[in-house]
Amino acid sequence: MELSKLIAIQHEVREEFGWAYRDDQESAENILQRFKSEAPFGLPSWNFQGRQVALESLTAALNVAEKIVFVGAAATRTMLERDWADGTVFVAADGSVGACLGLVDVLVVVTDLDGGVHLQEAVQRGTPMAVHAHGDNQERLTALLPQWAKYQPPVMLTHQTDENYEGMLNVGGFTDGDRAVCLVSFLGGDENKFVFLGYSTEHVGEWSGLTEPAQKLRKLEWMAKVLDRLYPSWKG
């Protein structure tokens, strides 16, 4: 699916929920400003070149993967307690990394930073993070990134505006779950290798961050719309 069409969905979402486009712009611009130095938060590995290296490493790992498993908020640890074939990699949506910890190694966590203690544990393990900026997570960005710096996880930055920000990507998508698939597709991941665990639209998974359940279910409906357009067989 064309990237422009995936990005257009973000405008539909803002209209649905009554969110201001300018808030998303402001969040993206604020986080990018914090990452513009040669050593953001004291880390050279988080500067523009370092983030490019993280993206290239992620791309290379996806290219050689035999299976790419997306782990959503309704995943259970039982789902992951199996013998996975060599060459299987795991991409976690935010707090769903909690289902993976101690069972499988996660290639990257796609997060807007509401994954709580599970996200923090993954950071402490040095798990790569694709950090997303949107209108209502600026306080979390401000609070968490300085804390994360001491663990030095590889970091990539994403946003959800029409602007082109050097050092940040808009890969499409809305929730962490569908944005994970958008990111992997953007980087050339082969959809024939995709496996989905814990991607539910019927209930709020145990690994979801703090959220209002009714609104979360509406958000999951949009996740499904994105995935239906991007990868129609995801439910199968």
Image (cartoon, rainbow, N blue to C red):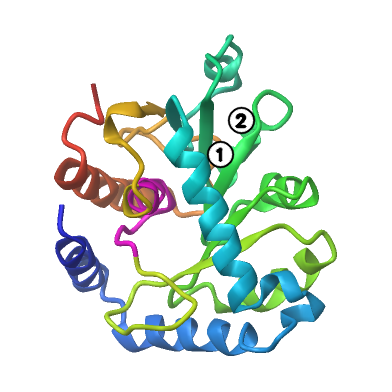
In the image: residue 135, left or right of residue 215: right
Cα gap from disc 2 to disc 1, whole angstroms = 6 Å
Is residue 46 among what the camera can see? yes
Q: Residues within 10 Å of mark 2 (few under 14, many from 20)?
A: many
Q: Position of residue 215 (x, y in %)?
A: 35, 55
Picture layout, residue 116 above or below residue 8: above
Residue shown at 61%/74% (left/top)?
A: 49
* Circles 2 and 1 in contact, beta carbons < 8 Å: yes
Q: Position of residue 234 (x, y in %)?
A: 25, 31
Picture layout, residue 22 above or below residue 87: below
Three-letter code, disc 1: Ser
Query: Is residue 231 or residue 224 the one in the foreground?
Result: 231
Residue shown at 74%/27% (left/top)?
A: 102
In the image: residue 182, left or right of residue 119: left
Can you identify the residue that label 1 sits on? 96
Q: Position of residue 208 (x, y in %)?
A: 52, 44
In the image: residue 20, left or right of residue 3: right
- Quadrant where the image shows the C terminus: top left
Picture layout, residue 194 above or below residue 142: above
In the image: residue 48, left or right of residue 223: right
- Residue 178 is one of the magenta-drawn residues: yes
> Within the image, what quadrant is residue 135 found in?
bottom left
- Residue 214 is one of the magenta-drawn residues: no
Q: Which residues are magenta?
A: 171-184
Q: Residues within 10 Å of mark 1 (few under 14, many from 20)?
A: many
Residue shown at 43%/31% (left/top)?
A: 68
Q: Residue furthest top?
A: 83
Q: Secondary structure at mark 1?
A: helix
Q: Secondary structure at mark 2?
A: helix
Three-letter code, disc 2: Ala
Can you identify the residue that label 2 sits on? 99
